[in-house]
Image: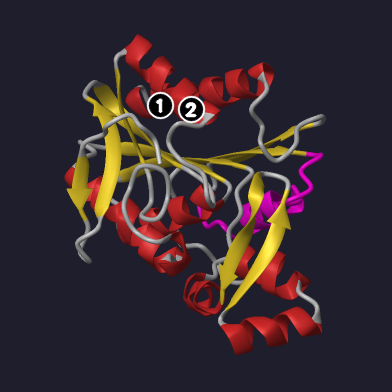
């Protein structure tokens, strides 16, 4: 947990959701992080600095069980983390928003937009991972792993992103099935911009292609980064993200 103190809002289940926000031009930008990530990451902080520099409204936050927010990570689900994001959207963000979702945040951005379509004017997904609990976790488990998680309720997996194993709970898998999107039409029409690394070994870029196929709106674009990995945090990747977000915001401010 970060030593820096953030303001917080209280969630419906009385947990503290840490956030940081700045007032400014509309549409605002709201950043949604990935699985086990926090708002002190490179993408979140770079977007924050950019929005402050151009005077654009900005919000970032930590899901419960992540970063500076309270709660137990192992009790979290896609639904509970979506509820966190919606509470921040409702209580902190002001006016029209462009949601910027990284990895799991791309899935949660779509769920937020479906819940609050009038407030969301655009979505930018970075290595978006909708349905990852089913397609990239459960379906990749061996039969023995599937049996273990059902028997024990939890399975620990090694990860290159952490010295400690990731805990995957049965509840995360089962609850995630209530929020799967890619096998049906996603009934959103706001502009959608996707950025994905061709060398992403965690969430293959074909998932972004499948997302485009499922998305109802026509104002969509997928940018592939030939040498990009899942993090997409190199200087050139960050520049691409900032340019993509700001260009979309300007298009929303000044429609043709």
Residue occupying the point 77% across, 70% down:
140
Q: Which residue is mark 1?
A: 249
Q: Which residues are magenta?
A: 198-217
- In the rendered image, residue 215 lying in the magenta stretch gets the answer yes
- Secondary structure under tag 2 reads helix
Residue occupying the point 51% across, 62% down:
186
Residue 68, located in which quarter of the rendered image?
top left
Position of the C terminus, as image quadrant, is top left
- Secondary structure under tag 1 reads helix
Who is closer to the viewer here, 65 or 210?
A: 65
- In the rendered image, residue 46 lying in the magenta stretch gets the answer no
x, y percentage for residue 137? 68, 67
Q: CA distance from mark 1 to mark 2?
A: 6 Å
Residue occupying the point 62% across, 59% down:
166
Q: Residues within 10 Å of mark 1 (few under 14, many from 20)?
A: many
Position of the N terminus, as image quadrant, is top left
Kindly tell me whether residue 114 is visible in this rendering.
no
Task: Please report contact status of discs 1 and 2: CB closer than 8 Å, yes or no.
Answer: yes
Q: Is residue 116 above or below residue 76?
A: above
Q: Is residue 117 left or right of residue 105?
A: left
Q: Which residue is mark 2?
A: 245
Nearer the observer: mark 1 or 2; the answer is: 2
């Amino acid at each position: 947990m970060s030593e820096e103190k953030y303001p917080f809002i209280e969630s419906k289940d009385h947990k503290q959701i840490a956030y940081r926000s700045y007032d400014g031009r509309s549409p605002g930008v709201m950043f949604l992080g990935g699985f086990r990530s926090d708002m002190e990451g490179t993408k979140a902080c770079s977007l924050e600095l950019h929005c402050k520099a151009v005077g654009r409204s900005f919000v970032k936050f930590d899901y419960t069980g992540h970063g500076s927010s309270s709660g137990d990570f192992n009790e979290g689900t896609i639904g509970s983390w979506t509820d966190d994001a919606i509470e921040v959207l409702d209580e902190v963000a002001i006016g029209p928003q462009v949601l910027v979702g990284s990895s799991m945040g791309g899935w949660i951005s779509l769920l937020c937009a479906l819940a609050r379509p009038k407030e969301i004017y655009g979505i930018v997904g970075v290595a978006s991972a909708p349905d990852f609990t089913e397609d990239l976790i459960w379906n990749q488990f061996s039969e023995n792993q599937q049996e273990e998680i059902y028997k024990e309720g939890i399975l620990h997996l090694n990860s290159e992103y952490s010295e400690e194993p990731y805990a995957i709970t049965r509840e995360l898998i089962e609850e995630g099935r209530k929020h799967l999107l890619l096998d049906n039409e996603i009934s959103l029409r706001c502009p959608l911009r996707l950025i994905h690394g061709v060398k992403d070994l965690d969430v293959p870029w074909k998932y972004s292609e499948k997302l485009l196929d499922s998305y109802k709106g026509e104002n969509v674009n997928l940018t592939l980064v030939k040498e990009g990995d899942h993090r997409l945090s190199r200087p050139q990747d960050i520049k691409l993200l900032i340019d993509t977000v700001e260009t979309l915001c300007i298009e929303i401010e000044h429609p043709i």
